[in-house]
Amino acid sequence: MAGKKMAQYGKQLLRRRALDCSMEETRFARCLSTLDLVALGVGSTLGAGVYVLAGEVAREKAGPAIVLCFLIAALSSVLAGLCYAEFGARVPKTGSAYLYSYVTVGEIWAFITGWNLILSYVIGTASVARAWSSTFDNLVEQKISIFFKASVSIRVPGVLAEYPDIFALILVMLLTGLLSFGVSESALVNKIFTGVNLVVLGFVIISGFVKGDTHNWSLTQEDFYNHTNTSSSSNASTESFGAGGFAPFGFTGILSGAATCFYAFVGFDCIATTSEEAKNPQRSIPIGIVASLLICFFAYFGVSAALTLMMPYYILDTQSPLPEAFQYVGWGPARYIVAVGSLCALSTSLLGSMFPMPRVIYAMAEDGLLFRFLSRMNKKTRTPLLATIVSGVIAALMAFLFELAALVDLMSIGTLLAYSLVAVCVLILRYQPGSLSSPGQCKMVDLSGEKTAMNDSDSGDEFACETVPLKEKFTMKLLFVPNCDFPTKTSGLIVYITTATISLVFTVLCCVLSVKMPSLVAGEPLWVTVCAVLAAVSIVCIAIIWRQPESRESLTFKVPFLPLLPLFSIFVNVYLMMQLDAGTWVRFAVWMTIGFLIYFAYGIRNSSVAQSSADKDKYEAALGAKTPIYLKEEPGTESSGA
């Protein structure tokens, strides 16, 4: 009895949402073009990091090889971007990774994803608002911070900020008002600021190639000694120089720099939340994601190349590298152009953090996993007004009062977890029979307890749906030699279980690589054996997935090179998560505890899926208790067929 209850409870946690892909029924205004989505992705991704990050990574980790760091980081980000692009083509609904998880791996994973996305967007909004305030403060020679520190200083180190940042509070509330006013107006403002930002970055790149010196990519120790007036016997001073040349800190430095640069490409996922506001989401979202990542890569690559050509990497300023670089080549006034670009980049990055936040809250509230009043929509502006205001007020208060440095890493957990789950979902769905209930697609219909494949006349499948074996018995042979060349229920289940297994193996392997890397480098037999066994299990799992038949469903975009690309994306994301410190994981546990209290106290009972399932059970019970009306006969009458 207890076992039955536990199994039933487990089914509740893993229940999946049925997807209705009809594009007519949406409460949002479909007004965003492909250009709007590209601008939103570029603006959200290409933030102030392009003005700061290049100097920090080039000086401390990679030197001129920072261009390779951005190339590696871009390739890793594109893997996640391709997975989002396929889901954008497959699921044209608001909710991003939250919804993708809900329709594929179940409710509890969807809640975990959505809850962490909310945290990421709130912290991202607050931290970018404070960065905007700090940048503006630097332009006016610290007058704002000096005034507030003297007038209303707060002394709670590690928790509250040094002073309440009224400027950041006002900025977030202004953008909250803009987002409440309408999505088309927000998109227009975003396009203007993104355009200015790209023009400034174009100026930086051209200036760097005009005033740069290719010798700065092949510096020697003699150049370093001549420039810094130090002797060759000074070991401490040469630490910032490394070995010289193009990659002064070696391959290790390039990989370390690439891990840091990966976070520079975070933000494109906001495009996936616009599915119900895009005019043609199944076309625009894949194009928007891929195009925005390419534009951002060329911008980061160009700025980092220009910066290291203008100035030797070992004297770059880690806080404001571009103004210092222009000063170094004799173009001091250009710092004001850079400042304008930096403020525009921060503005678009702030809008990019705030735009998806209420939409994820709205999607969760509409599904009943969060409080339903948050799903109320303004009929005039057709935006989730209450979710926008509530999320904006929370982010504004965080920017106003809290010290956010310790919380920024929590953004990484939420983002990387979402990336990983989207890759898992793509991998699972590509090997399942049928489709996600999209119109005109091949569906599995239950007839008298047996599954039969049906195909509509307007099917978008590349091939007509074949008849799936009704009762396929599992054997070990099916792991490597499937019975047919199209997905079945058994082959789909094999991929589902194998994907879960390899995700767990990747998690353990990444833990070992993160914690025991010195032991592995030293060649300790125990840890080398552990890694070898985990790698062997991973290869077997990859082979099993690769041998299963892939779905032939026609989509406007598909991730290529299955199953390798999604699996590599999962590995990279999990590895980066394991690099975060213990304090971040403790804070993550606290946040998840709060979330689980909400879910188990409210969401699990008020879920729309749970309610529809309960209504169906009541209907079937009521139907079974009554005699069908056509079997009833009036006394003294004959049946109509007599």
Image (spheres, rainbow, N blue to C red):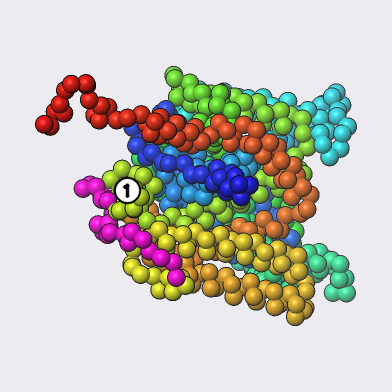
Q: Is residue 473 magenta?
A: yes
Residue 116 seen in the current view: yes
Q: How many marks?
A: 1
In the depicted view, which residue is nearer to us: 392 or 488? 488
Find residue 518 and report its image quarter.
Answer: bottom right
Q: Position of residue 29 (x, y in %)?
A: 41, 28
What residue sits 40% from the left and 74% below the top? 481
**Percent of width and height locating residue 494:** 47, 63
Where is 427 relative to 359, above or below?
below
Q: Is residue 601 left or right of residue 78?
A: right
Q: How far from the left and from the top, in percent, is residue 14? A: 54, 47
Majority secondary structure of magenta residues: loop
In the rendered image, is residue 264 in sight? no
Front-most of residues 375 and 170: 375
Q: Residue shown at 86%/67% (left/top)?
A: 236
**What residue is pinned by disc 1?**
448
Image-quadrant location for residue 302: bottom right
Within the magenta stretch, is there residue 330? no
From the viewer's perspective, is 235 left or right of 501?
right
Q: Residue furthest front?
A: 636
Q: Of helix, strand and loop, which one carries label 1?
A: loop
Q: Which residues are magenta?
A: 454-475
Quadrant where the image shows the C terminus: top left
Please provide percent x and percent y for residue 332: 67, 46
Q: Nearer the viewer, residue 475 or 157?
A: 475
